[in-house]
Amino acid sequence: MADSKRGQDYVPEGKSDSVCKKGEFIVGALRLDHGHIYGMCTGLEQAGATIGYVYDQDSAKVTAFKEKFPHVTVLESEEALLDRQDIKLVATSAIACDRVEVGLKALEKGKDFFSDKPPFTTQEQLLGARQKVKETGRKWFVYYSERIHVEAAIYAQKLIEEGRIGHIVAIKGWGPHRLGLFSRPDWFFEKEKYGGILTDIGSHQLEQILVYSGAKDARLIASHVGNLRHPQYPGLEDYGEAMFETDNGIPCYLSVDWFTPEGLCTWGDGRMIIIGDKGYIELRKYVDIASSKEPDHVLVVDENGEYHYQVHGKVGYPFFGQLIRDCLDRSETAMDQEMTFRSIELAMEAEAKATVIRGFA
């Protein structure tokens, strides 16, 4: 499943130390509409979780999932999975607009929940999830993979926390993706189902901005979306950008698009620049174009010189182990729950208030 040319099938490779006993943390996978479910479950399995059960109404998706996780038990219905008392966490990559439904059911059944991004497509869905978390005390995690499943991004966070580039001054993020028209399901082209480009892949950027800036919130300054070159798909937005100011005074910019050319060896040239008052960091997450096809490049310039760290296979993915321990210990180390929700809320606000750019007559 680790297809580097198709973002929806990309599964980062890497190992994590097991944080629990065998069989102590059992996961049920439900509604396999997006390939991110493989990255989600692989990360959990490498941290010690048991991918125990699966259900999807599409038997072909279940068959493919069982090839990756051969020990998984296939259940006969969604209700059967949600009723399993031994399941600690329900994971889903349902159609984006339907993910909240799965989460609400999971929390009602006393389970924690792990959603693909975006976890919501409307403000009403977010309000319902916030209320359900408050009522049940359960956890609602989101697979913001461009930070939590990228070793370069994790290493950059460490450097920032160590003060390597001083106080953060500005953050700029780019999230280009390959469209892959013929491999996409119909719902991918319906805005009411995927939520718009800023809601979808823009939520990755907002989550990183809040984490790297050390902020709890941000203010939208301006945003733009458009279907610039795909008039045959009127529901598609192929370009989006937004500007924010964090609550600790850091200006931030994000740009996302579906224009990755076929000549690139991977699905997208994701980058981020974090500027400090004593240096800056550039992340070249998935490739260093025309130089190295290996992922996870961290470039640093500080008061002492220029540095290039290639950290693939050297950092690991601590998020998944932290998630497991948070569920078992009822702690909060993997993700701040309110920041998890606020990231997508800001993305949805940027989408809702965006000026539409017209790219073709």
Image (cartoon, rainbow, N blue to C red):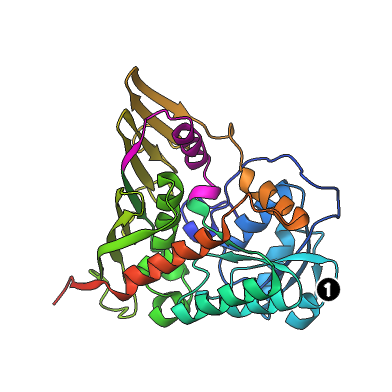
Q: Residue flagged by tag 1: what amino acid is it? A: Arg
Q: Is residue 338 magenta?
A: no
Q: Residue at x 59, y 76 (%)?
A: 131
Looking at the image, is 29 positioned above or below residue 290?
below
Callout 1 crowding tier (Cα within 10 Å): few <14, some 14–19, many ≥20: few
Can residue 94 be seen? yes
Is residue 69 left or right of 291 when viewed as pictured? right
Q: Residue at x 34, y 24 (%)?
A: 302
Residue 315, position as x, y percentages in the image: 58, 34
Q: Nearer the viewer, residue 248 or 139?
A: 248
Give the residue at the far left of this rendering.
361
Is residue 287 left or right of 259 when viewed as pictured? right
Quadrant of residue 40 within the rendered picture: bottom right
Looking at the image, is 199 positioned above or below residue 151?
below
The region drawn magenta spans: 147-169
Task: Name the residue tied to disc 1.
Answer: 84
Q: Residue at x 44, y 35 (%)?
A: 160
